[in-house]
Amino acid sequence: MATPQREQWPFQPGLACFNAWKNALSLLVDCSIPDDADPASFDFHGCAWQLPGAFVHVSGCSAMAMSRTQQVIDERPTPHMVLFMVLEGRVTSNYDGLIQEHEPGDIVIVDYSLPYESETSGFEAIALTFDKASVQTELQNNAHGLVLTVNDHAGAVLGTQLRGLAEYIDGLSVHQCQVVVDGILHFAAAAYATPATRERRDKRFLFQRASSTARQGLSDPDFGPDELVAALGVSRSKLFRLFEPHGGVQRWMLAERLRGSLQSILRSTPDHKIAAIARSHGFRSEAHFSRAFHKRYQISPSSVRTLARDSMRMATYETLLKRGGGNGSAIVEAWLAAARA
């Protein structure tokens, strides 16, 4: 009985591992590590099995980023897709404009004929790579970025299948493994084809479009829901349903304006007037801004400026920003709450 041949990653952490990792993935993606990471301590590990119609990978990596831009797609075409299951860590990915953060238990489809980027501070994962033309049309068409989570019944079943294959593959024949893979892909096609799964992705994508468009107009005090509806080309009711989990469009816009102004106060010099900061973030008057700011943060804008003069507090803020990958809007409010306490 022929069993799949296990290929073990042969490099220990270090510079040779980093260079070999970049070279191994060069046909698919451009690879890099964060500027503050040391290639000499880079770690990639794992193993792979080649089957007649698929590759099975169980691997992990330290902090890294991968990018498959349109230029890479044109220069290095490939017929492959992949089912990627996160086991440990978190991975933030951009699927041709749709940004999603994946956590343990998430299983996502990546279509390498479309742009794709990802970054992580470290992960462990199972990946099942297959030829796009060999699977059901439900996986071939409009599947890029579709996610099943561990909270989805179908996601839990699919995750169990992937884990089982990775755990027992060494004891199965090549034929048995391929039959298991075919079954996994057949089930995945049915699981990802549900309207709810696609609607969830499309709704997330539309919200990202809406929030990105809105942020571009927040400096204009006249920019509101009507202007956002016109810019997106959607109905008013659809827009309001989209922002309902965030308290509505107006509340979301106010929160974003306040977060932006808070960041600006921390970055501003003492001679930069609070009134000017308020106007630059879409507030018609300093009085309106101050009332809204105090209601949200229980502190005045001028008191925040006083806190910002404390070098130790600002050093803590910069450290939090660096650790958070620059996601300042969430970090700045957490920092302010801690600073006030």
Image (cartoon, rainbow, N blue to C red):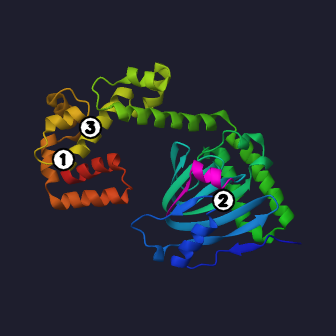
Which residue has dot 1 on it? 268
Toward the viewer: 61 or 65?
65
Q: Secondary structure at mark 3?
A: helix
Of the numbered discs 1 and 2, the one sitting upstream in the chain is 2
Q: Identify which amino acid the numbered label 2 is placed on.
A: Ala
Front disc: 1 or 2: 1
Residues rendered magenta in the picture: 64-77
Residue at left offset 67%, top offset 53%: 83
Q: Amino acid at mark 3?
A: Leu
Query: Is residue 73 shown in magenta?
Result: yes
Picture layout, residue 234 above or below residue 307: above
Q: Which residue is mark 2?
A: 127
Pointer 1 local density, CA inside 10 Å: few below 14, some 14–19, many at least 20: some
Relative to the observer, which residue lies in front, 109 or 191? 109
Please say whether residue 315 is visible from this viewpoint. yes
Q: How many marks?
A: 3
Q: Amino acid at mark 1?
A: Ser
For residue 300, say whether it is visible: no
